[in-house]
Image (cartoon, helix red, strand yellow):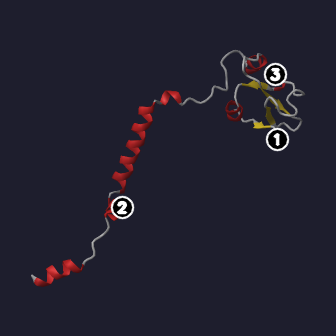
Amino acid sequence: MGNSVHARKLQRRRPWWRSLFRYRLAAVLVMLGATSAGYLAVGYDRHELPRVHHGGDSSASNAAVREAGCDIKGNINERGEHIYHMPGQEYYSATRVNPARGERWFCSQWEAWWAGWRKAKV
């Protein structure tokens, strides 16, 4: 009996965080549940992606009509690059939007980026 008691005292006690490795699946599920509950508590309906494609007959007819507050010009250059121009940029006033070529107006930079357009470098 004396030897077993002495052997227990010599064993090093494992740190508390090491036992988490044994229960890693349960820990992951608890973290996933906590983040999901937090996301639902905030309200997931406020995190919508922008509506780039408008319903209707064709996208060209919708792009031809400029909505109020949609001042970002989407232009396609000679090489086929899709570029958007912000008000105040150098070539903004010279840029023309031609819906027949697939060019369009955007209401936000996020909407333009989401549609696959890049910002003008100048």
Q: Residue at x 77, y 37 (%)?
A: 119
The reply to whether dot 2 and dot 3 touch (C-beta < 8 Å) is no
Marks 3 and 1 sit apart, C-alpha to C-alpha, by: 22 Å
Which quadrant of the rendered structure holds the C terminus?
top right
Q: Circle 1 is placed at which residue position?
A: 121
User: In the picture, residue 76 is in which quadrant?
Assistant: top right
Dot 3: what SS? Answer: helix
What residue is pinned by disc 3?
99
The span from disc 2 to disc 1 (Cα, nearest Å) is 50 Å
- The residue shown at (45%, 32%) is 42
Binning the other alpha carbons within 10 Å of mark 2 as few (below 14), some (14 to 19) or many (20 upward) gives few
* Residue 7 pos. (x, y %): 19, 81
| Mark sitting earlier along the chain (2/1) | 2
Q: Secondary structure at mark 1?
A: loop
Tell me the quarter of the image containing the N terminus: bottom left
Q: Can you tell which mark lies on residue 21?
A: 2
For the residue marked with disc 3, what is the amino acid? Answer: Pro
Please tell me which residue lies in front, 104 or 59. 104
Type of amino acid under label 2: Phe
Q: Is residue 14 left or right of residue 6?
A: right
Task: Give whichever of 102, 18 is nearer the camera.
Answer: 18
Determine whether 63 is above or below 122 in the image: above
Which is nearer the N-term, disc 2 or disc 3? 2
Q: List x then y, in percent, for residue 100.
A: 83, 22
- Which mark's residue is nearer the viewer, 2 or 1? 1
